[in-house]
Structures are given as C-alpha cells and as structure tokens.
Amino acid sequence: MRKDSGAVARVVGASLFLVLGLWLVLAVGVAGVLRDVQPRLALTWAPWDARAKAKMAEGVMAGKRDGASLTRARSLSESALARDPMSIVALRNIGLIDGLTGHIAEARRTLTLANKLSKRDLGVHLWLIEDAVSRNNIDQALLQYDEALRTSSSARDLLIPILVKATDDPAISEPLRRFVARRPSWAPDFFSRLADNGPSSAPISAFAQSWGAYRERDNWGVVQKLINRLYRDRRFGEAHGLFLATVGIPPARAPLVYNGDFETTPYFSPFDWQLINDEVSNASIDRMEGHGALFSTIQGSRANAATITLVLSPGSYAITSTARSLDSSQGANGRWLIRCEDAVRDELVSAPFESSNLSGDLGASARFKVPPQGCRAQTLVLERSTANGSEDPGLAVKAVSIRRLGS
C-alpha cells in the first residue's frame, strides 16, 4: 500500500510540475505577444515582466500627467528596472518624469545613459535634442539629430521636416550647412525634402555646394529636384550654377550653349537639351560622320523639336549653327529662336537655316541683344516647319553656339 501511495505521489508531483511548466511557458508566451500592445493584460499573466511594466508606465504617462499618475509611472518603471536594468523604455520614462517635475540635471543624466545603452529610442533622442536647443547648443542638437537619423527607423519622417523648416533660420542655417558638409547618410533625403518643401528663402544652393555629394551620379536625381526648385523660384543663376558644378564645368569656362555640339546624352533639364517627342515631333541626339548631331523630323506644318535654357547676362551676342538636310535632294526648313524666360513671348532673335552650298549643308546666324532687365534667363528653341504641308525630309543639326560681342 505504501508503494502504491509513493507512486501516486510521484505521479501527482510530476503532473503538477508539468502543469506549472506549461502555465509558465503559456504566461511567458502571452506576455511576449501582449506586452507592447496590451501591457496590463500581459501583467495579469506574467506580473514579473519588465517590458510590460515599462510599457504600462509609458501608457500612464501618455494620459494624465498629474502627480499621482507620474508617481505610479515612476513606480512601475523602477520595478521594471529592478528586473531588467537595461530597459530603455523604463529609463526613458524616469528621465521624462524628472524633466516634467523640474529635475533637469537628473533627467539629462538618465536620458544620456539611456542613449548610451541604445541609440534606437526616438523619445530619448527627442528629449536630448530639445534639451540642447534650450541651452542654445545648436552643434550638440545637430549631433543628436544625426544620431537619431542614422539609428532610428522612425526618425526621418519626423525630424527631417524640422531641419528643412529651419534652413532659413540664421541661428541654425549656418551650423546645419557646416554639418551637411560632412555628408551624413541622411543628406540625400534631406535635400530631396528641401527641394520639395523648403522655405522660399532657404539658401538651397549654398547648402548643396557645401554638401558636395551632388557630383556623385547616385545623387543626380536629388540634384535635378534642387535645380527644378531653384528654377521654379526663378533663381536662374543659382540653378545654372548648381548645374555647372554637377557636370564639372567651371563657370569661367562654361560654353554659353551647353552641349552645343551634341556629344553627350542629355541628362539635366532645363540646362541640357530637352528633346520633344510627341505626335508631331521626333527628336534625338545621335552620331553622324563620327560627331554628335541633333536629328529631328516633324509630321505637321510647324513644331518645336528641342529646347535648352541659357543664362546670358545683358549685352550683345551672335548665334551660329550648322546643319544638313537628311535628304540632299530636298531642303529642310528650321530656325533657332531665343526668348526671354521671364516673359516667354519676348522673342530676342530668329535665325533661320539657309542653304550654304549645293551638298545640302545649311547654316543659321544672327545677332541679338539681351536687355538689362526682364531677361535673366533665355530659352533657345529649335523650331521646324514644312512648306505647304509637304513631307519633312528631316534635319541634322551639327552644332549651335553663341558668343558674346564686344565689351
């Protein structure tokens, strides 16, 4: 009988141990699932769970911030820390409570410790940024911004718009310009948003010049957005300067018509060729006799084939161009037009192509003046036409150039 009783006791003990083990596994599993979304429920299953306590304290602080609520949140956070000294959420809660109750030095120490333990908590970063700004330590604030933007996946959508908005603040603009010169990993995103949403008075070109990484082909998409923004703001000189810097041409050596011999494939608009391909125009840059040429055909009486934006200062100029009809037995009609960008209808010159010999070669030339006002940028247009609706034989422009006349 004693033997049977001992066996029963062992079976009962093993069963209880198994049930306890299963309950513990279930409690830990439920807590793991619920601690971040339902911390109160998670604690009913696993009252020892440090993360659930820290998250519950965070929820308490998100509601009322009266004395009783803050005291409860601190108690939960301290209990979480006793269980897990590496709990960043608990440290952040205690630091924020110290800040809310006026214990700034203590808050700074706690949150700095939390930041050393983990760089991924955005709430810690935000408090440290605000703390640096409150002390007028812009350089420290920018270092904290940089750390947050590099390590927190949720930081960019929140923090970069703040930096973009601050670009025209003299107190922040200059330190920020120096900081982007370090080429932080988030700079392309910053410049993309600066182009989209930056203040109209933001020193966009100065920021870009300091950054320098616009010369890297991987960033050319961002550069195009910056050029478009400056152009849209009618800051033509700045847009053109950024374009020249990107393609690596010193302003003093820049041709007045970029890629006027059509040797490279167009990339940036509007300061490189914009080829018009639609139902009435077909334009492309290709090779002809070993050199580049601008080919165009039209399916109508008149159409624009290509445009490019120039930035000519006031003064006198001459335009020259050479071309060839693609069918030497027929003449190809076309002309160059230059209009002021500030007033598109303000035509400066028309230079039609005319036959220069019997082999089908064509030439165009004309002189013109850029007025001292109202013409800060110009559009050069290749306009094509056909006589009496006849079929267009096609035109290949070998080169176009502009030179300044006199002084």
Image (cartoon, helix red, strand yellow):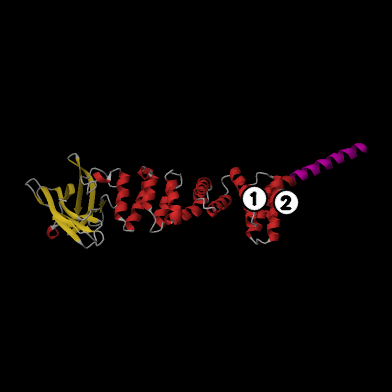
Q: Is residue 12 magenta?
A: yes
**Magenta stretch: helix, strand or loop mostly:** helix
Tag 1 secondary structure: helix
- Is 36 left, or right, of 23 in this rendering? left
Label 2 is placed on what type of residue?
Answer: Trp
Q: Report if residue 325 is visible in the image.
A: no
Residue toward you, 399 or 252: 252
Residue 147 vs 388, above or below: the answer is: above
Residue toward you, 223 or 239: 239
Magenta stretch? 1-22
Q: Which residue lies furthest to the right in this view?
A: 1
Query: Residue 45 has which mark?
Result: 2
- Where is residue 170? Give x, y as percent: 43, 55
Q: Report if residue 79 is visible in the image.
A: yes
Q: Residue at x 69, y 48 (%)?
A: 80
- Is 255 left, or right, of 200 in this rendering? left
Residue toward you, 286 or 298: 286
Select label 2 or label 1 by which is in front. 1
Would you call the spot at circle 2 few (<14 residues within 10 Å), some (14-19), or many (20 or more)? some
